[in-house]
């Protein structure tokens, strides 16, 4: 999917539509010592029947998140691109 590098969007700080720079953001790294992650690892241990958390089906795409940066006040805000799932987002 192609998306423009610059869009005209609403800025909550300026309270009007302004030009925004578009940047693709990736998910941050998960923390290994987080409570949920430790619980998840403990659940995967052992010889149990069906192991929780191991998925057989891979997802084919995900909802892309882009970061919009206002060019007048430099405020950044994320935007999820609709309900459409795409494998790759290209800034054109």
Image (spheres, rainbow, N blue to C red):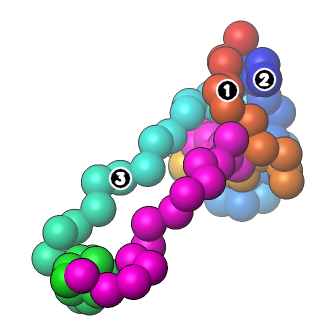
Q: Is residue 91 left or right of residue 17?
A: left
Q: Residue at x 74, y 36 (%)?
A: 86
Q: Is residue 47 left or right of residue 10?
A: left
Magenta extent: 47-73
At which x and y percent is residue 37?
27, 78
At which x and y percent is residue 36?
31, 85
At which x and y percent is residue 56?
55, 57
User: Any mark on residue 43, and which?
Assistant: none
| Dot 3: element | loop
Q: Residue at x 46, y 42 (%)?
A: 26
Q: Is residue 52 shown above or below 15?
A: below
Q: Is residue 61 left or right of residue 82?
A: left
At which x and y percent is residue 76?
55, 49
Q: Are marks 1 and 3 in contact (CB under 8 Å)?
A: no
User: Any mark on residue 1, and which?
Assistant: 2
Residue 69 in which image quadrant: top right
Between 22 and 25, the one lying in front of the other is: 25
Q: Residue at x 17, y 69 (%)?
A: 32
Badge 3: residue crowd in 10 Å (few <14, some 14–19, many ≥20): few
**Which residue matches tag 3?**
28
Q: Is residue 31 left or right of residue 20?
A: left
Quarter of the image where the C terminus is located: top right
Based on the picture, tell me whether residue 42 belongs to the magenta stretch: no
Badge 1: residue crowd in 10 Å (few <14, some 14–19, many ≥20): some
**Which residue matches tag 1?**
89
Q: Is residue 40 shown above or below 7?
A: below
Quarter of the image where the N terminus is located: top right
Q: Are marks 1 and 2 in contact (CB under 8 Å)?
A: yes
Q: CA distance from mark 3 to mark 2?
A: 22 Å
Q: CA distance from mark 1 to mark 2?
A: 5 Å
């Amino acid at each position: 999917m192609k998306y423009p590098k610059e869009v005209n969007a609403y800025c909550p700080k300026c309270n009007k539509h302004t030009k925004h720079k578009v940047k693709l953001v990736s998910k941050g790294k998960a923390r290994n010592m987080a409570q949920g992650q430790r619980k998840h690892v403990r659940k995967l241990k052992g010889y149990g029947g069906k192991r929780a958390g191991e998925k057989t089906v891979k997802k084919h795409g995900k909802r892309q998140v882009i970061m919009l940066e206002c060019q007048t006040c430099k405020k950044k805000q994320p935007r999820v691109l609709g309900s459409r799932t795409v494998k790759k987002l290209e800034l054109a």
